Image (cartoon, rainbow, N blue to C red):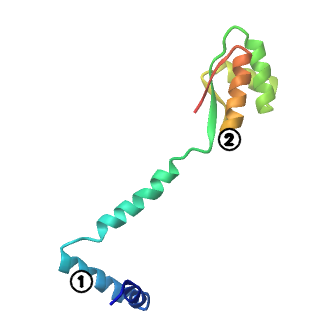
């Protein structure tokens, strides 16, 4: 019997017949089908670790607090008081769940204004 014939026979089986076949193979060869399933289940988790969203965290304000407040206002669209609250609350997220390129641009703007920022 060729591999193609075996696959054809498996395709025509019901779920119950397949379960019985797996059980028979496990008993016959002393193996478990659970191990390959666990490995296959772990593979999607590794793919999920690729990060696509980043947060920009304002770590420290520096000496030019007013400049940093202006940059935070520009980035977030917040009002003056809300932007000041973000700056005064450092370390604090400035913008969250954004693409890496945008996060790096925001970090550069904050650092140009004298602040210390981090992309996470």
Say which residue label 2 marks.
99
Among numbered discs 1 and 2, the one appearing first in the sequence: 1
- In percent of width and height, residue 9 lies at 39, 91
Depth check, front residue: 9 or 56: 9
- In percent of width and height, residue 69 lies at 76, 19
Up/down of 46 relative to 113, above or below:
below
Q: Residue at x 67, y 16 (%)?
A: 115
Q: Residue at x 32, y 90 (%)?
A: 1
- In percent of width and height, residue 97 lies at 65, 41
Using the numbered discs, state the Cα–Cα distance from disc 1 to disc 2 in whole angstroms: 50 Å
Say which residue label 1 marks.
24
Residue 29 occupies quadrant: bottom left
The answer to whether any part of residue 85 appears in the image is no
Depth check, front residue: 80 or 76: 76
Q: Secondary structure at mark 2?
A: loop
Outermost residue to the front = 2
- In percent of width and height, residue 2 lies at 36, 87
């Amino acid at each position: 019997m060729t591999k193609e014939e075996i696959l054809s026979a498996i395709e025509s089986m019901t779920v119950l017949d397949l379960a019985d076949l797996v059980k028979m193979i496990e008993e016959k060869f002393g193996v478990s089908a659970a191990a390959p399933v666990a490995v296959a289940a772990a593979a999607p988790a590794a793919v999920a670790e690729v990060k696509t969203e980043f947060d920009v965290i304002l770590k420290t304000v520096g000496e030019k607090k007013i400049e940093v407040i202006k940059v935070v206002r520009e980035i977030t669209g917040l009002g003056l008081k809300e932007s000041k609250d973000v700056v005064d609350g450092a370390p604090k997220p400035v913008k969250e769940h954004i693409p890496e390129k945008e996060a790096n641009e925001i970090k550069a703007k904050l650092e140009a204004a004298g602040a210390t920022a981090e992309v996470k």
